[in-house]
Image (cartoon, rainbow, N blue to C red):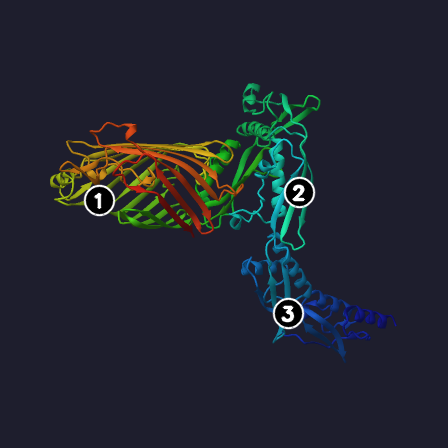
Amino acid sequence: MKKNLLAGLIAAVFASGASAFEAFTVKDIRVEGIQRTEAGTVFSYLPVKVGETMTDEKAGQAIKALFATGFFKDVRIEVEGDVLIVALEERPAIAQIDFVGLKEFDKDQLKKGLKDVGIAESRTFDRAMLDKAEQELKRQYLSRGKYSVAITTTVTPLERNRVAVNFTIDEGEAAKIKEINIVGAKAFREKDLLEVFQLQTPNWISWYTKNDQYSKQKLSADLESLRSYYLNRGYLEFNIESTQVSISPDKKDIYITVGLNEGERYVVSSVKLAGDLLLPEEDLRKAMQVKPGDVFSREKLNESTKAITDRLGALGYAFANVNAAPEVDKEKRQVAFTVFIDPGRRVYVRRINVLGNSKSRDQVVRQEMRQMEGAWYDADRVALSKQRIDKTNYFSEVNVETPPVPGTTDQVDVNVKVTEKSTGNISLGAGFSSSEGVILSGGISQANLFGSGKFASLQLNTGKLNRTIAFSYTDPYFTVDGISQGFDVYHRTLNPTSLSYTYQTKSTGGGIRFGYPIAEKESLSFGLGIDSTTVTVDQTLSPKRYIDFVNQFGSTNVSIPATIGWGADTKDSAIYPTRGGIQRAGLEVAVPGGSLRYYRATYQAQQYFPVSKSLTLMLNGEAGYADGYGNQALPFYKRFYAGGVGSVRGYDTASLGQRDSVNGVLSDERLGGNKRLIFNAELLFPLPGFGVDKSVRIGAFFDAGQVWDKSEKMSLSDMRASTGIAAVWTSPFGPLKFSIAQPVNSKDGDKLQRFQFQMGTTF
């Protein structure tokens, strides 16, 4: 009776046919009803084999095990004489997954997400998993502000026990933030406070930023930004008391209300240092940005403790603890700080690990490391290493961690985690001027060739003025100590007839170059090349100096230019610098062995100054001087020119400087100059309406420049100037650059160029 009851319970629980039977010896096992599942898989779940005794208990175990696989929707154990029959009904397989009405997401990405919750093509269909997948889809849409989304799931049976799963989606319209209200603000205007928010009400650029769509994560970040805004301005007791997010009945508008309590504004009364200082107190106080009498600022306090931590880290104390303990006097609205310093143990680096690089070789990262294995830990060198890796521009993200080595108290590992990005670039450029019309240019480059850190590029230019095909290659670590090596080959055709010039040149050449680091951020460069230039002049219309040059040296000349240069780069970023700068000085000399003798000296200084968190001032100055030697004149096509992109925007390319005269009448032909002076100032800032998004950067610029002949006196009053607006947009299609310039002191005969744009894409 007990066995009959057990079998009955099993049958009731699993809703399958499991009749009570007496124990028997199994002579054979037969599996029925399977189509995709292997018989061996079924046998592996059975608790009995041929020759063993079968009981009701073992039958129950078999049913549980087979149901647990998820492959079957019905399992029955039957007995026919001494033969055990396992009758199965398989769950259908998912043959295909499709979406109707999908616009917001990529279909392949959604399929990948559904796979994580158990729904994927070729997998066993499970209704419970389907419900879970439907909820996940809704969650994804809610994260994009699509609160009215409706999802209908259809399961269509197919032949061979398969099903097709179809998600019909009515995405609806994304809910927009209608209002953001801040309640309780007295010290600052609500308008100023809302500027620190990433979430915004709709504006003209919302289609791109999506900042008018509510996100819980974005709101949390905005509230923290609001907290920092107050704490950095003395409001030590600031508190956000409530946050309310409501949606309109039609699910189209969202209202956000933030309630806050500003508290009182506090001033720092004193700052003390305590603990094991290691360094003289006077040196540590220089690192403190918080001083008595200052309005309290959490940002300055954190920067102060970080500066002390970094000072100790540079001495090998990787786990120094520097904490500031406040003493608040509410009556006087003052706060005193005691900075406790615990340097801990001095440690050294056991191993440097490079992680996340699937294409780039480890050596590409390691060669930029300034922290060495086996040496004392140096926080400054670790930070410098991170900066150098970031400046390679091979990685979208670089993170450096220094975890302690388990089981030790004086060792750390340096883990460099990188996220690789596309380092190839295909660029297309276009410009327009009244003289040249449309100018097209293009190029292809690979900055991390085959993951080796080497650089190669091919440049093409189809402008009427300048047609170029050039190939360059650079190995930044030709030797292990950082000597770089590269070469260039080119063919250029200069045809400035569209600018009213009466000559043409065709140059073919190449050269080899080396770079030698002389300091962490300084280097020397050396190069030697060969150039063959053919000059074509008009014996009737060309200036006399052009005709005289061809008559003296011939129409084709070979020169051997040797170059030496010095450069220093202290910019904090290769893409969006906000501080630091570059300096470059170079000298090119046509050495004996060729048919020409000349030299060209150039110097450039560029500096970035952070005016505020969002404003950066860029100043750039360039100077050049060139002449011939050995009783030779400077070749006219080696003279300096100014005007256009890269010098003085607003004026046509190479249109500044001395003009030629024919029979005492000035022509449109520019002769260039032996001397060149350029000045640029640009105030860079994010596009209004983008909040903290830096994908678009605007620059209000002022350009000035001119070239002079050797016989002319350089005078600032001769310089042409322009002002305008430039924009750089890191768009989904690649970087786009625009500029509109207006000359401010143009003279009669000046040729103007006001608009330019450039676009490119990475691969």
Identify the image quadrant of residue 564.
Answer: top left
| Residue type beneath disc 1 | Ser
Q: Under tag 2, what secondary structure? A: strand
Q: Is residue 330 above or below residue 657?
A: above
**Marks 2 and 1 close (CB-CB < 8 Å):** no
Q: Earlier in the sequence, mark 2 or mark 3?
A: 3
* Pick the front one: 409 or 100: 100
Judged by depth in the image, the label closer to the viewer, 2 or 3, is: 2
Q: How many marks?
A: 3
Q: How far apart are the two marked residues, 2 and 1, measured between alpha carbons?
A: 65 Å
Question: Mark 2 or mark 1: which comes first in sequence?
Answer: 2
Q: What residue would you read off at disc 1? A: 500
Q: Is residue 470 left or right of residue 277?
A: left
Q: Are marks 2 and 3 in contact (CB under 8 Å)?
A: no
For label 2, the residue is: 257
**In the rendered image, which residue does mark 3 sit on?**
155
Residue 27, image x and y in percent? 73, 77
Q: Residues within 10 Å of mark 2 (few under 14, many from 20)?
A: some
Above or below residue 78? Residue 454 is: above
Left or right position of 244 against 403? right
* Camera sees residue 249: yes
Viewer-side label of 1, 3: 1
Quick check: marks 1 and 3 in contact, CB under 8 Å? no
